[in-house]
Image (cartoon, helix red, strand yellow):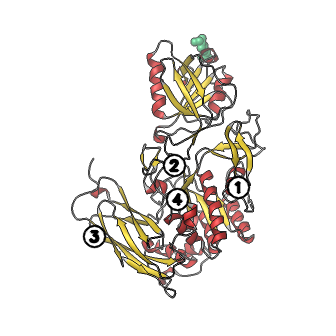
Amino acid sequence: ALGPPPSSTAGGSAVAGAGFFDYARGKAVGMAPGARIAVYKACGEEGCASSDILAAFDEAIADNVDVLSVSLGAVGTAPNFYSDNTAVGAFRAVSKGIVVSASAGNSGPGDSTACNIAPWFLTVGASTLNRQFPGDVVLGNGETFTGTTLYAGEPLGANKIPLVYGGDVGSKVCEEGKLNATKVAGKIVLCESGVNARAAKPLAVKLAGGAGAILASTKSFGEQSITSPHVHPATAVSFVDAEKIKKYIRTQTSPSATIVFRGTVVGSTPPSPRMASFSSRGPNFRAPEIFKPDVTAPGVDILAAWTGANSPTELDSDIRRVKYNIISGTSMSCPHVSGIAALLRQARPEWSPAAIKSALMTTAYNVDSSGGVIGDMSTSDASTPFARGAGHIHPNSAVDPGLVYDASTEDYINFLCALGYTAKQVAVFGSSISCSKRAGSVGDHNYPAFSVVFTSNKVAAVTQRRVVRNVGSDTAAAYTAKVTAPDGVRVTVSPETLRFSSTEKTQEYVVTFAQRTTGSVTEKYTFGSIEWSDGEHSVTSPIAITWPTSKVAEM
Ligand SMILES: *[C@@H]1O[C@H](CO)[C@@H](O)[C@H](O)[C@H]1NC(C)=O
């Protein structure tokens, strides 16, 4: 079912008047509309078999593709790289010069939920854009709660109609067959999340003779609720708003409500982008010194092509067939980055997959449309780099990043050795080398970001090395470092100035992260950045520090 949305997002040609019914209607175009698309089937109705994933990678490699867009990944805790076939297939592809852009996953907002976390992936989180599909719940007392909906049928009237809570009429999650028709007929039902699919809840209400549904989001999602293309009047509200509506139902003798469908609203309120609550987070579960996710891109309520083989809700009873649908997930943000990577590949054919990733990461932006740090819908606060990665991609800057952090297949093998992999485990990646001859630390992998783990208060300092290559037009450029130190560490960069010439295109530097001996930190993770600038380019890498529990002050 995932085929058409990612492929049209990455490489769809321009089409006038695209939309889901009247929602998001207008000219739509993919990121790289001139690109040719090859599709390899790795998933079916029973999921994505490891053997099929590997076969798909092999076919794509044999076809000499430029970019692989991988909107799939392991579910649950990220597996070891040698037993993760998406990581193994991606390793082979990257070794052949193919960029592999992959979803971070939809398991947020908890820590270390990101999948596709090997350093050779370009790992993408999901954020909002400046477009909303509001559906307001208006209660009998006039209180209004703005939800989100893609309901496209006959609207409800302005008159308030009786409102009930699913838990009082047979099913708190509004399961089909469990709602009592006598108690639901003609009413709006408040449904909790979980058990059945979101779009199945209003359908269950419809079958019981109800007039509409209000879908509650989950607590961990904070202010976010998920938009669905409902077949019956419905809107999804945040957990907190649903609790208020529930309280209203409990305290009124004749609770009532209506839902007002407001269509498509584009604007600066709320600010965008904001990180989706579902977007999977760092730190990296398998290699904490490799910063993840890498970047963020649009992944909430994305209009894209849809298959004629399935309804927009993916429910059998939904007989609608549409050319375009609007869905959310890192499966939608990943192909945005894949398309941009294809444009970069064309503009800079000599760049490696690691150089393309570096360009996207070091030029990403971290500020939203209101000038604040990109927010996080799960907390209603500023997001951290473990949610947004190095930031939201900024394609026009990525084509001229100034410096790149490159990495070769050999660097990735060194990384596997630094993890302590056995010869047998390294052999899974097609390498016959013996790690015993190789030293090095994971933290020295030439990543365009820094992740430092202090395992105890006694570790005085951690040092990491990096090499940058000048890819700017000025071969004699000089770059100076500017550090924004995370709480709890002193950061020293040596040397502080990097001078390039026509014969010295690469320069090495060393960063030392020294624990401050006094005081404690208030968070388990603290963040900062290193920015190299020649006055024209700004090459910025996030820094993430993970602290031992003993260093974090009781709050
Ligand atoms: C449904 O509700 C009505 C009215 O309260 C009640 O009489 C009936 O027993 C309920 N049906 C079931 C199956 O619970």
Pointer 1 and pointer 2: residues touching (CB < 8 Å)? no
Lower sequence index among marks 1 and 4 = 1
Pointer 4 and pointer 2: residues touching (CB < 8 Å)? no
Lower sequence index among marks 3 and 4 = 4
Ligand 1 shown in quarter = top right
Q: Which residue in the rendered view is the most extreme toward the left?
A: 518
Q: Position of residue 492 (x, y in %)?
A: 32, 72
Left/right placement of residue 242 relative to residue 39 reads left
Lower sequence index among marks 3 and 2 = 2
Which residue does the image show at 60% across and 70% down from the upper left?
A: 91
Lower sequence index among marks 1 and 2 = 1
Whole-number angstrom distance, CA of label 3 to CA of label 4? 30 Å
Whole-number angstrom distance, CA of label 4 to CA of label 2? 13 Å
Whole-number angstrom distance, CA of label 3 to CA of label 2? 38 Å
The residue carrying mark 2 has its beta carbon less than 8 Å from ligand 1: no
Mark 3 lies on a secondary structure that is: loop
Three-letter residue code for mark 3: Ala
Residue nearest the viewer, comparing 277 with 27:
27
- The answer to whether any part of residue 464 appears in the image is yes
Query: Disc number at residue 273?
Result: 2
Packing grade of label 4 (10 A; few <14, some 14-19, many >=20) is many
- Kindly identify which residue carries mark 3: 460
Q: Nearer the viewer, mark 1 or mark 3?
A: 1
- Kindly identify which residue carries mark 1: 7
- Kindly identify which residue carries mark 4: 295
Query: Disc number at residue 215?
Result: none
